[in-house]
Image (cartoon, rainbow, N blue to C red):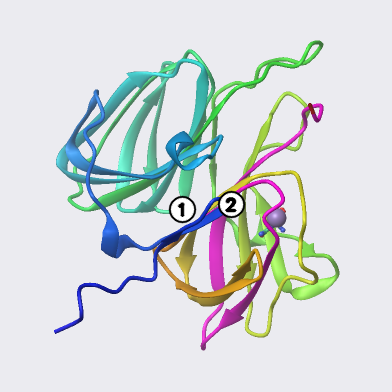
Amino acid sequence: MEISALTRSVVKHNHAIIAPDGYINSNVPGWTNCTVNVIINEQMGARLAQTLITLREGGELQGTTQAAQVFFYVVEGQLQASVDGQEKTLAKGEYVYVPVEKSYRFHTPTEGTQVLTFHKVYEPLAGHETPGVLFGARDIAKAPIYMNDDALRIQELLPNELGFDMAVNIFTYDMGGHLPMVETHIMEHGLMYLEGQAIYVLDQQWYPVKKGDSIWMAPYCQQWATTMGKEPSVYIYYKNVNRFPT
Ligand code: UGY
Ligand code: MN
């Protein structure tokens, strides 16, 4: 039997690794017949929220976004989506961006459907339109090489336009891939590993991570990562972008 007093999860002032072994479920009004794990939020010191929702057969997520926009990504299974009057079936790897003040309803016939969400309070920008509802899909063909290294590919899931104040990207590291430098930056990240294993270095500390693990990086938390093992490592990540540095 495993020793239950051990975990790979850590929570520090400027970063956290949250492995699934420590999840405790939350109840979220309007989200029914599902388990919800709030992985990152302001209680931690973060300015985004990240959740993982696991739906049972007939599970439903219903509500209206308020100050925060919400990005929903299907990690497993499928969802029937109805967002601001637009209907669509979302399969694994598909997503929908729900801007502020829009109604949404998702339901699933598939037991075990998993949905990852990123939430950020929207900061409007004078002269630029608030984004509309946007559907899309993971697609490696839309992932250009990152920083001239053909072992690294990034797909941007949201348009790189000033109306958006958040980015959500999928970062694929082929075998031998690693970040070209230790990043030190004002932007904050939340992420979840979708595939593979890696070593992540956060604030000079080294962590083994794998599929299912999530990471929070506060602004200026130094970061570096390298893939590990016999398959590529892939994560989906959030970043705040495009606003004046206050
Ligand atoms: O966009 C980024 O800042 C990205 N390269 N950081 C990361 O993956 N930790
Ligand atoms: Mn970064």
Mark found first going from the N terminus, 1 or 2? 2
- Residue 79 left/right relative to 74: left
x 68%, y 30%: residue: 165
Q: Which dot marks residue 93?
A: 1
Q: Position of residue 186 (x, y in %)?
A: 75, 44
Q: Position of residue 85 (x, y in %)?
A: 41, 16
Q: Is residue 238 above or below residue 5?
A: above
x 31%, y 61%: residue: 20
Residue corresponding to mark 2: 14
Task: Name the kind of residue labelled 1 in the image.
Answer: Gly
> SS for tag 2?
loop
Question: Does label 2 point to a residue whose CB lies under 8 Å from ligand 2?
Answer: no
x 66%, y 70%: residue: 204
- Residue 239 left/right relative to 77: right
The quadrant the N terminus occupies is: bottom left
Q: Quadrant of ligand 2?
A: bottom right
Which segment did they paint magenta? Answer: 216-245
Count neighbours of disc 1 (C-alpha within 10 A) and say few if under 14, some if 14 to 19, many if 20 or more. some
Q: Which dot marks residue 9?
A: none
